[in-house]
Image: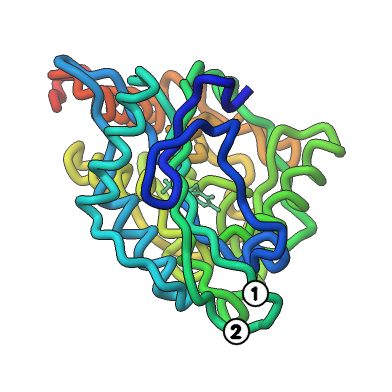
Amino acid sequence: MYYNEQTIIYFNGSFVKAAEAKTDLYSQSLHYGYAVFEGIRSYPVAGGTRLFKGEEHYDRLRRSAEYMKMPFAYTTQQLVDLTYETLARNGFTDAYVRPIVLCSPNMALSKGRESFLAIEAWEWTNGYMSNKMRIMTSSYARPNPKAFHVEAKVSGHYVNSILACQEARDKGYDEALVLDSEGYVAESSGANIFYENDGVLYTPPLGSILPGITRATVLELCQEFNIPVEEKLFTPEEMRGTDAGFFCGTAAEIVALASLDDVPFRLDWEESLSAMLQKAYTARVRELPHVQFENLTI
Ligand code: PMP
């Protein structure tokens, strides 16, 4: 479902068929989760295809590789150019791009000696998380920032995400709300979180979370709309039963929450500031000229 016989990927210096690309079974990436990656959306915009914040994503990829002491010599501009080329060769506009930096065969627990870049992409048919989500507080904590570079997007960290997400699904919820090691709300298995109460938005500060590019965009939009927003630590108890809440991420975009631990959010979603931000986000990524909300225009 991610590729077929025709799909082209960029892999280690050339464009090849996804079905023919090979990786090494002795790679540190496979054995130890020692790989870094990104998730980027491309959107159809007037006159073509646009990566949303492609530079920010590739800056983060380069930083992630640096944190993990992986050799990785591409510049952000080269990475952006290679991505547009991958999209063009496949004829994709509305797509999800997944670049990953893999390391060479090495069973030792020392840093990678050589890295390989793959840029994979698939068409985005959406509906990933389009319904309001019922979420539960996870019994799993996020990786401890004293044990991992949590600000890096490292493959191995996602074993924790799989545990949290699957626990929530097994219990009949859509997603997990994962706490940091102190018991404060951190994020979900693959997105950042905001809640809204009495006209103010709240989101956890950086420290135990992935510094999301969508989260940064929401903060920018709040500034543009003059919506008060605070970065602060809070517990799930403080968040339950407030006006509204949402997850945000490149794939999820902005997805409304229905309830936390079966306690519904109070407002009708359409009445919330969060819903306004959701519309503004769609307009921003698709480069729609103006969105109007009562007397506000962006
Ligand atoms: N947190 C986690 C754990 C994630 O995997 C993601 C998705 N990359 C996010 C937050 C959101 O980050 P972004 O907005 O940059 O996609």
Residue in the image at 23% along x and 51% along y: 78
Residue 227 is at least partly visible in this image = no
Circles 2 and 1 in contact, beta carbons < 8 Å: yes
Nearer the observer: mark 2 or 1; the answer is 1
Which residue in the protein does label 1 denote? 106
Q: How is the image coloured?
A: rainbow
Element marked by disc 1:
loop
Q: Residues within 10 Å of mark 1 (few under 14, many from 20)?
A: some
Q: Is residue 66 above or below residue 22?
A: below
Question: Which kind of residue does numbered mark 2 sit on?
Answer: Ser
Tell whether circle 2 marks a residue whose Cβ is less than 8 angstroms from ligand 1: no
Which residue in the protein does label 2 denote? 110
Q: Residues within 10 Å of mark 2 (few under 14, many from 20)?
A: few
Name the spot of residue 90 as percent of width and height, x first: 39, 22
Q: Is residue 88 above or below residue 76?
A: above
Q: Quadrant of residue 237?
A: bottom right
Name the spot of residue 93 as percent of width and height, x first: 33, 20
Q: Give 49 or 22, whichever is nearer the viewer.
A: 22
Measure the C-alpha gap from mark 2 to mark 1: 8 Å
Residue in the image at 59% along x and 27% along y: 2
Q: Is residue 280 above or below residue 151?
A: above
In the image: residue 185, left or right of residue 201: right
Q: Give 259 or 40, whichever is nearer the viewer.
A: 40
Question: Which kind of residue does numbered mark 1 sit on?
Answer: Asn
Q: Quadrant of residue 197?
A: top left
